[in-house]
Image (spheres, rainbow, N blue to C red):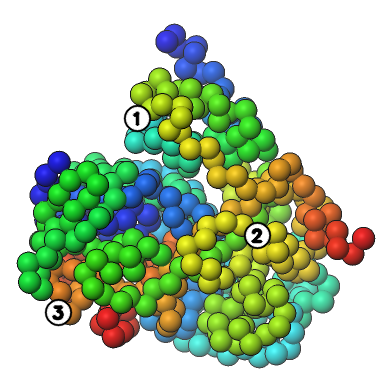
Amino acid sequence: MSCSDDKIYICRCEEVTREDIEKAIADGATTLAGIKKRTHAGMGLCQGRTCSKLITRILAEHGIKPADVYPQTSRPPVRTAKIGDFVEEDDV
Amino acid sequence: MNKKADVLVIGGGVIGTSIAYYLAKQKKKVILVERYDHAAGASGSCDQMIIMQSKNPGVHLQYALASAEMYKTLSQELDYDIGYHKEGGMILIETSEEMEVMEDFVARQKEIGLQVEILTRKEAAKHQRGLAEHLVGATYSPQDAHIDPMKLNLGFAYAAKKLGVEILLNTEVTGIIQQGNKVTGVETNQGTILAPLVINAAGAWAPLIGQMVGLELPIKPRRGQIAVSEPVAPYVKGDVLSARYIVAKYNPDILEKSDDRAVQLGVGLALSQTEKGNILIGATREFVGYDLGNTREGIKEVLKNATRLVPGLKKMNFIRVMSGVRPYTPDGLPLVGFVKGLEGFFMAAGHEGDGLALAPVTGKMVADIIEEGKTFMDVSAIDPNRFNL
């Protein structure tokens, strides 16, 4: 892997690079949640919709079968939602 | 795998890693086992507050103040940035009844040595923008702070490892080895670890470890649901709570009798903003066993409560909700100390929502008690034997 590959952004929202992900794995992370808590990858606006596949692949390169990588806990909202709309929807 | 240690710590959250770090400073050979990963339980699903004002005036507040002192230099000590910011905090007061309760609370906190005062709504508005018009005032303390809980957890773990602590992740305790009334080690899914001292720092899951040695621990999982906003420009200064949160925390009985859903769900405001700009909006306090899910109702009540107190939040977007269980105890204090009649078994769990605030002082006190048989504070109030185990 060349030096520039290391600096590729895996999570664009939180600007987490491949190098950051590799460090988290070296630190003992074996799951998407473990990598997220060490790097913030998947914590941004898109909530891991792009990077979780890329991270699963990186984990596979370290011997963890993609089938064994649990998806992130699925939590609302599906898309970014305005707080005011959500709390007032009953009143409409 | 067969391993040996002086001390075995169960639990890789902020409490377990803090204990491992302070024990290693005392030159103990420590092994820490964690079922999943650091920050996998409450330490990774909480807000970020090191808040003094929410603590009961008494030993509870004294422990928190001792911890607050340690936090000032903890990043330097651990040689790791834990994201410490001391920006003060306030508790918003909505009614004259709440004002009465808070006046008494504040007076007693002052006696313990907390810098805290009651502000009018106008004065409060100078500290925090966007406050609702109906507020009758707020308490304010400059001593409240916050940290990044995941960084705190990892910071303790890395510093412990540097001192020789062996941390075994993905290692689940399946049994406790006993010889008569003496604990001599643990069985895990990765093999046996022998140690003459086993510390139960499993947080909300501590009762399950307790059951392995026949203890009925009074710790119960209590769920907190939190919403997370998109990153925004600095908006929430320090930590912002509501007086209703204090009521929810210390008077669960009153809440059970209410027919207001928000009250039944234990909803109280807990508002703070991260370094990246996300606003954490909490929280419920619900007894639902180990259910880590979010509910639409819970989040709605949390956001309704928050926007009633700080209407400016309505214009913002939320991107995520989270949920975790905290280790509740009946008297609001953790269980820290040796268990009588069971040699070599030490409790360090039950901090509920105060795990962050009390993590450093808990680690230090536990290491002191184990090394010297005493510590710098009176620990009789948190002695696990106060309950009939």
Q: B153 or B1, which is in the foreground?
A: B1
**Which residue is at 32% across, 75% downward?**
B217
Q: Residue B261: image x %, image y %?
A: 70, 75
Task: Give left or right: position of A18 versus B197.
Answer: right
State which mark lies toward you, 2 or 1: 2
Name the spot of residue B194 as percent of width and height, x first: 11, 54
| Quadrant of the image containing the N terminus of chain B | top left
Q: Amino acid at mark 1?
A: Ala
Q: Which residue is mark 2?
A: B295
Q: Residues within 10 Å of mark 1 (few under 14, many from 20)?
A: few
Select label 3 or label 2 by which is in front: 2
Q: CA distance from mark 3 to mark 2?
A: 42 Å
Whether residue B375 is visible to the viewer of this picture, yes or no, is no
Say which chain tag 2 marks: B
Disc 3 from disc 1: Cα separation:
42 Å
Quick check: can you spot residue B320?
yes
Tag 2 secondary structure: loop
Say few, some or many: other residues with alpha carbon within 10 Å of mark 2 (under 14 / 14 to 19 / 20 or more).
some
Residue farthest front in this picture: A67
Q: Which mark is residue B341?
A: 3
Q: Chain of mark 3?
A: B
Assess whether mark 1 and mark 3 are in contact (beta carbons under 8 angstroms): no
Residue type, mark 3 in image? Gly
Left or right of residue B75, residue B305 in this image: right
Q: Is B27 placed above or below B282 here?
A: above
Mark number displayed over residue A26: 1
